[in-house]
Image (tube, rainbow, N blue to C red):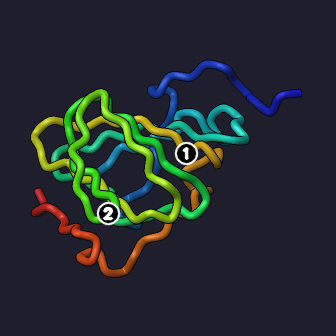
């Protein structure tokens, strides 16, 4: 018997994760749409995040899974291994595990991204780690609203 508990879900049925403003998150709406707790997934996690202007996910890396983000609307800076990329609608990235990266929305429009952690059924199982010296990774938080 399959561990899947449902086969169809809407992002509106999923509550935002309570990531607060710690662990490098600031002002994001993160929802684990396909995950162990929402659909009974055992192998992968699909997330949706909205970054309003000034929101960010500071420097971090995952030891247990790659990350595959795909931009839906708006734009944001995605920093990976010393280079800044601008994600715009229709762009995607492959961020291998153990590679430090960060994302920040410096524009007026919300940035919406979906993505997959292909090796774990939840964001919480990616073993996300936060480096201590953010400045070493080219990151400065935007001025607070």
Q: Kindly identify which numbered label has been placed on residue 131.
A: none
Locate residue 91 relative to residue 100 in the image: left or right: left
Q: Is residue 21 visible?
A: no
Mark 1 or mark 2: whose residue is earlier in sequence: 2
Residue marked by disc 2:
58
Task: Using the image, determine if residue 15 lies above or below residue 24.
Answer: above
Which residue is depicted at the point 32% across and 48% down? 28
Task: Using the image, determine if residue 46 lies above or below residue 124.
Answer: above
Locate residue 102 relative to residue 119 in the image: left or right: left
The quadrant holding residue 49 is top left
Name the mark nearer the viewer: 1 or 2: 1
Distance in Å between CA atoms under marks 1 and 2: 18 Å
Pointer 1 with pointer 2, Cβ within 8 A: no
- Kindly state the secondary structure of the residue where label 1 is placed: strand
The quadrant holding residue 115 is top left
Which residue is depicted at the point 51% across and 27% down? 13
Residue at the far right in the pictured view: 1
Q: Is residue 131 visible?
A: yes
**Viewer-proximal residue, 23 or 64?**
64
Q: Kindly identify which numbered label has been placed on residue 117.
A: 1
Crowdedness near tag 1: few (<14), some (14–19) or many (≥20) residues, C-alpha within 10 Å: many
Quadrant (top left, top right, bottom left, bottom right) of the N terminus: top right
| Residue 117 location (% of width, % of height) | 55, 45
Quadrant (top left, top right, bottom left, bottom right) of the C terminus: bottom left
């Amino acid at each position: 018997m399959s561990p899947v508990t449902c086969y169809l879900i809407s992002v509106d049925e999923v509550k935002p994760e309570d990531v607060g403003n710690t662990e490098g998150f600031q002002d994001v709406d993160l929802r684990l749409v396909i995950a162990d707790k929402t659909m009974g997934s055992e192998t992968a996690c699909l997330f949706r995040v909205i970054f309003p202007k000034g929101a960010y996910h500071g420097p971090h890396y995952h030891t247990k899974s790659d990350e595959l983000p795909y931009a839906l609307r708006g734009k944001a800076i995605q920093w990976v291994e010393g280079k800044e990329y601008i994600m715009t609608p229709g762009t995607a990235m492959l961020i291998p595990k153990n590679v430090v990266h960060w994302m920040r929305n410096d524009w007026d429009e919300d940035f919406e991204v979906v993505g997959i952690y292909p090796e774990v059924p939840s964001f919480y199982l990616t073993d996300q780690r936060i480096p201590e010296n953010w400045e070493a990774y080219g990151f400065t938080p935007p001025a607070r609203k």
